[in-house]
Image (spheres, rainbow, N blue to C red):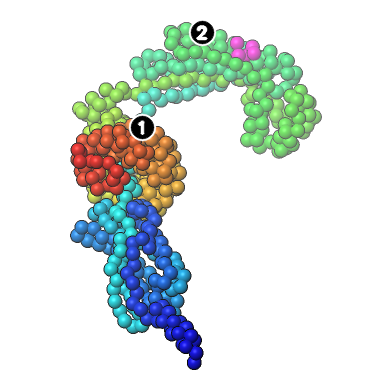
Amino acid sequence: MNSKVICVALGVAAIGLTGCSKKLGQFRSDFFSANPSPLETVGQNVPATVNGNIPAKFMVKKARVTTTPVLTWNGGEVTGQPVTIQGEDVRANGQVVSYANGGTVTIPFNVEYRPEMAQSDLYLDFSVDQNGKMYKLPRVKVADGVIATSTLASAATVTPATAPDKFEKVINEKYTADIHFLINQANVRTSETAKADYIDLNKRLMEANSAPNQEIAGVTINSYASPEGTYDYNKQLAERREQNTASYVENQLKKDKITEFGELTSSFTPEDWEGFKELVEKSNIQDKELILGVLSMYKDPEQREREIRNLSSVFNELADQILPQLRYSRVMASINVIGKSDQELISLFNTDPQKLTVDEILYIATLTDDNTKKMEVYRKSADLYPSDYRTFNNLGLTKYVAGDYAGARADFQKARSLNPASKEVEMNLGLLDLLDGNYAKANEQIGAAAGVPEASDALGVYYLTQGDISKATTAFGDARTNNAALAQILAKDYPAAKTILAGIPTPDAITYYLTAVLGARTNNENMVMTNLRQAIRLDSSLLQRAQKDLEFSRYNLSFL
């Protein structure tokens, strides 16, 4: 054999041995990149993707590498799902990397977040199987730490749903009486003002005039003519009825020495076709559908009347049953009944609460922002009105705010037993499940509370725990809460987050902490420092979090 051919053959053999038989070299950190880096929580998890770019002449053809992502921290570690990387001569289902050309690999990672992960490192471990020989390669680091801003979402800060009271400081009552007229007449007859409904109306006006807690808000008169005859004549007739009725009522008010009655207003309707239609619809007239057809077909009032008169078979019934009811003036009195003042309610609660209605007691609780005082009011309400679900729902609300979640659950369950259909109770039980991590059940219960004002904030927090930022921002809507601001920060809509944070009515430590995070993300050092100081002043436990929080890795926080 030619010596050149021998040399070439030996060279090819050597290359083959290099690609198949040599031991796999060590992986390097610069082969890999993590996305995101540093890692970041999404909801309650830490998801990431490690992308590898393996160079040419590295991956041995018969090597099979089990690659395991490992997140480590001081005192602990957690592993993700292993991924197989293999040379081109391995018969398996791993990600294949060419020896000659190299290749790319993808290693997903997702673990449940723990607070100690804030200071951590993500590594890759490598276990090699090459022709049945097993060996390990040194782990390599691919990412630093975990940003855990999303975990600031808190169901504990969501305001539970209040079952509202029905207390009204001013209750408006309306009383009416009709004065009927003879055909083509406008004089107010004594027989009409002697009827029970008008006497009762007049009596009610006198009672309101003398009662210290009542006022006459106004008296209104509406006068009508029946739709027969010419329009002009009916207009004059209805107007005379209005004038005569108003004059009579004014004289009656003077006679009864009622001087404070708001305003006396009056009006007239020449032809009451709407009333005519309504009465016909309710009647037993045999051909009423024919009459209603005429009303819908003709809009001109005089043509309507002509066509109805042409229905000779039914016009006599109309004249007897319907038209007399349309010749009248309606007198309506509007009376305001003024309830107890706030001071009167509080005084009675302190001295003789049995004299208060359940709605009055529930209203009293709204007069204070002190949760302890609210709890005291709702306890008394539950004692006095144990069958009203609202007392237990609202008592549970105060316990929830106080952090007594077991007590809150007991009260909410009692409220549900009294009113299984209550949406407020359903939402509040959903909040407790959200706190406990029972996310599917929480979603079902909060979803069933649609329409309850507080449900949007609760639903937004649910979506934050699931890492669905888009749905969270939609659910929060125009809410001005820490959770709503957090959603905008995670969505990277920093102007919106700033607006929400500035509009929170009662900012707390988390409000200031989130504002500091916003400052860090928008490179505003003064915003970071000023708000961290205030956050830690309100909640000293935030100092340790801030010092470990990679949101602030570019800032010196030693002064804190």
Main secondary-structure element of the magenta-colored stretch: helix
Q: Is residue 62 magenta?
A: no
The disc at residue 479 is none
**Label of residue 502 in the image:** 1
Residue 505 locus on image (x, y percent):
33, 31
The residue most toward the front is 3
Measured as percent of width and height from the top left, residue 282 is found at: 63, 35
How many labels sit on residues?
2
Residue at image x 62%, y 12%?
Answer: 187
Give the SS element for disc 2: helix
Query: Which range is magenta?
Result: 239-243
The residue labelled by disc 2 is 251
Residue in the foreground of this view, choosing between 392 and 451: 451
Q: Is residue 87 visible?
A: yes
Q: Earlier in the sequence, mark 1 or mark 2?
A: 2
Callout 1 environment at 10 Å: few (<14), some (14 to 19), or many (20+)? some
Amino acid of disc 1:
Ala
Q: Amino acid at mark 2?
A: Asn
Q: In this view of the protein, which residue sits in the foreground, 32 or 151?
A: 32
Q: Position of residue 54 (x, y in %)?
A: 41, 66
Is 301 drawn above or below residue 26 in the view shown? above
Residue at the spot x=71%, y=38% of the render? 289
